[in-house]
Amino acid sequence: MQVKILSCLLFCFSSVSYAQEIGETRDEKYLEEDKKKVSAVAGLSYIHNIFGLLYQDKIFRLRPNDAFYTEFFLRYRWLDVSFSLAPKLTRINNDDPEKGKSKYFNVGFTFFVSPKLRQYVYFSQVKGLYFQDTKEFMRLIYGDDYNEEGYLQFPDAKYRSFKGETSYLLLGNKNDYRSFNNMTYKPLKDIFIVSTGLFYQYNILSDFNKTIYQGEIFNESADNSPSKDFRIALRSGGGVQKKIEGSWYAILEAYPEFYYSKLIGEDFHEFNVGLYSNARMGYDNGKWFFGGGFQLNWINSSNENFYSTTQWLFRVGIGFRFNSPTFVNRNFDKIDHILK
């Protein structure tokens, strides 16, 4: 009897080990084939963004008009590129005449410096803002009896943001973590990752010389210096990736953060805490894929609008993979050989 039980246990362990080896071999084969493919994604995002303007020790909210824009992601081997804008042909922005028009442009790169170290760089710009707190602002100037409707528009105003993040994987490696970045990389298995990183951001709010209010245009000739602020945050947390059934999957990430923000040239700064989180669900059969996700960036700050934090973002997209040109493979093989 004991011999039968021992034999059964040995058979079970050998079967599990064999299944794991089969799975690892299949994943390695897919990763090797993936080196010669390009992943492309087209999507649509809605971003709820509020900027802040400090005036007489009060924070007034500035907003872009509508926030739908198209996104494109392109990934080849270890390089991820994202590009987004709001082209006129898509007609996704139903601009409100009282709030003016807003234009969007974003570009970003993500790549691994080593199997554990990931680098992210990003530039975004939105042009055309309106004063959400117009009535409160006017009452501050003309008194509490002011009751006119409408919004102050700043058609030339620009908000430019330079962002970066350097993160280190405490648990996991780049093959596991790549699928957390965006939909360009196929989730291969159930994994759990832990990372810590440094996030940094430099913002410029400028070009408020031109104002439109109730159909009238005002041009301010006086010097209007841009407002600049800097933010740095330490993020540490983890993520879970779960294969559901067939080619379906789900991903969830959460990163508590400690941050410091500073208004450049002014005696205005603060330390605080926050949370960056991301969730996504999708389908990926290796050739084509689609999915949707939700991102939340919360900061426990009474001046949260001033530091121009994106409160939330919703994204959907669809993509496919195709073979990359031979000369591209050949040149990247040389680069990969140098980086090893």
Image (cartoon, rainbow, N blue to C red):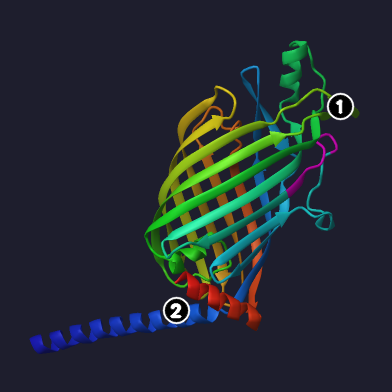
Q: Amino acid at mark 1?
A: Asn
Residue that appears at 29% across and 81% down: 16
Above or below residue 338? Residue 47 is above
Is residue 101 located in the magenta-colored stretch of the structure?
A: yes
Residue that appears at 45% across and 50% down: 254
State the quadrant of the N terminus. bottom left
Coordinates of residue 191 in the picture (x, y in percent): 40, 65
Residue 290 relative to residue 137: left or right: left
State the quadrant of the C terminus. bottom left
Residue 171 relative to residue 70: left or right: left
Chief SS of the magenta region:
loop
The quadrant where residue 42 appears: bottom right
Q: Can residue 285 be seen at all in this image of the molecule?
A: no
Q: Which residue is labeled 1 in the image?
A: 219
Coordinates of residue 174 in the picture (x, y in percent): 45, 66
The quadrant where residue 238 appears: bottom left
Is residue 221 located in the magenta-colored stretch of the structure?
A: no
The quadrant where residue 201 appears: top right
Q: Nearer the viewer, residue 219 or 3?
A: 219
Q: Nearer the viewer, mark 2 or mark 1?
A: 1
Please give the range of residues in magenta: 97-104
How far apart are the two marked residues, 2 and 1, measured between alpha carbons? 61 Å
Q: Which residue is labeled 2 in the image?
A: 27
Q: Residue furthest right?
A: 216
Q: Nearer the viewer, residue 12 or 45?
A: 45
Coordinates of residue 154 in the picture (x, y in percent): 79, 33
Above or below residue 155? Residue 113 is below
Q: Nearer the viewer, residue 86 or 33?
A: 33
Q: Amino acid at mark 2?
A: Asp
Residue that appears at 47% across and 41% down: 233
Coordinates of residue 209 in the picture (x, y in percent): 81, 29
Q: Which mark is residue 335?
A: none
